[in-house]
Image (tube, grey):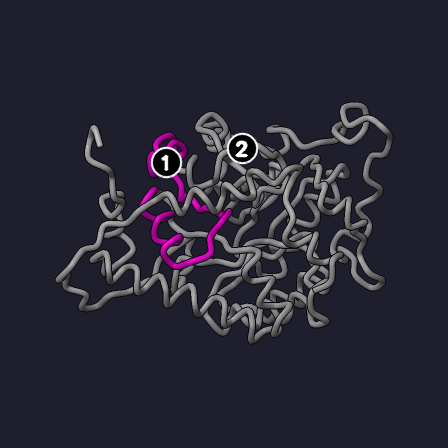
Amino acid sequence: MGENAWAYVSGGAADELTLTENRAAFTRLKLNQGVLADMAGASTGLELFGQHLAHPILVAPTAFHRLLHPEGEIATVIGASAMQTGMVVSAQASLPLEAIANRATPRPWFQLYIQPDRDFTWSLARRAEEAGFAAIVVTVDAPVSLRNREQRAGFRLPPGVEAVNLRGAGPQPGGDSVFGSLLRAAATWADIAVLRRQTSLPLLLKGITTPADAQRALEAGADGLVVSNHGGRVLDGQPASIEVLPAVARAVAGRVPLLLDGGIRRGTDVLKALALGARAVLVGRPVLYGLALAGATGVAHVLKLLRAELEVAMAQTGCARLDSITSDILWQPEPGR
């Protein structure tokens, strides 16, 4: 991939403690095996926001796929569609959102950043709706970030790679002070309420990690939440996404679907997330590694591995369907030991 792309895709915020913790937390969770279960009619299928999905694994929104492969997001969506995988297309995609949507099965979702130019933001949401996207996913956790690995690598986009769907959005705030410039036009809860009125699509907020923010999101009209620390790329020192999921799930109490991203590398990770309250998961970096290695074929292969591993994990824990996956499959040490 080269140092430039590797730093961008694989790096995290600051000392990358949260990036590391996203994986470590999954390894600390242990599973109970369930034997002799009746697996007749077993399925990984689910219904989510009016769509039937073949499995609970979606492609997370990640930027600039042409940084990794000349066919960019088109290769990614072809690979995802071959595995009947839903894809969340980034606002910072390197190809037009309409071209990506035209190649997607099932219908994709569109990830949105609220830009300083609010009118542009609302028009971009309407453009995604007109292009056939099935949901809007607003990333709420990244007004600013500090990624030292990218700084050390001198990260820059190569010529010909840009966020083409953000053309016309106007310049980002400048200046030397984060508080005095970059955050001056940052999104607030009031913007979520406005966006809710701008689109009829299901609206998800991505970057929720606390029960308090989950409650505010529901009050603002969110139809779903993505429990996420942005893959460890925004605030270092946070707990892993999987660690905060149970508290958010208790606060939401089934009122809207929860999804999770951050650290999913195996089918057993998917199973653990579902056991703790997620309806589905989003996978980012592994998909990008597959894209870089082999284009659409690489993407499809990564997703095929994850689905096959999930099916094996479900069979070994005695779960024939997704709704039979509960926290009972997670091993707990005996008290006092």
Instruction: Give the spatial CA distance, label 1 vs label 2.
Output: 15 Å
Residue 271, percent across and down? Answer: 34, 53
Q: Badge 1: few (under 14), some or many (20 or more) residues near its Cα, within 10 Å?
A: some
Does dot 2 land on a helix, a strand or a loop? loop
Q: Which mark is residue 238?
A: 2
Q: The disc labelled 2 sits on which kind of residue?
A: Gln
Q: The disc labelled 1 sits on which kind of residue?
A: Pro
Callout in the foreground (1, 2): 2
Residue 137, percent across and down? Answer: 56, 47
For this rendering, which residue is in front, 49 or 275? 275
Q: Which mark is residue 246?
A: 1
Is residue 164 shown above or below 116?
A: below
Left or right placement of residue 187 versus residue 213 in this view: right
User: Which residues make up the magenta segment?
Assistant: 247-276
Quarter occupied by residue 103? bottom right
For this rendering, which residue is in front, 260 or 133? 260
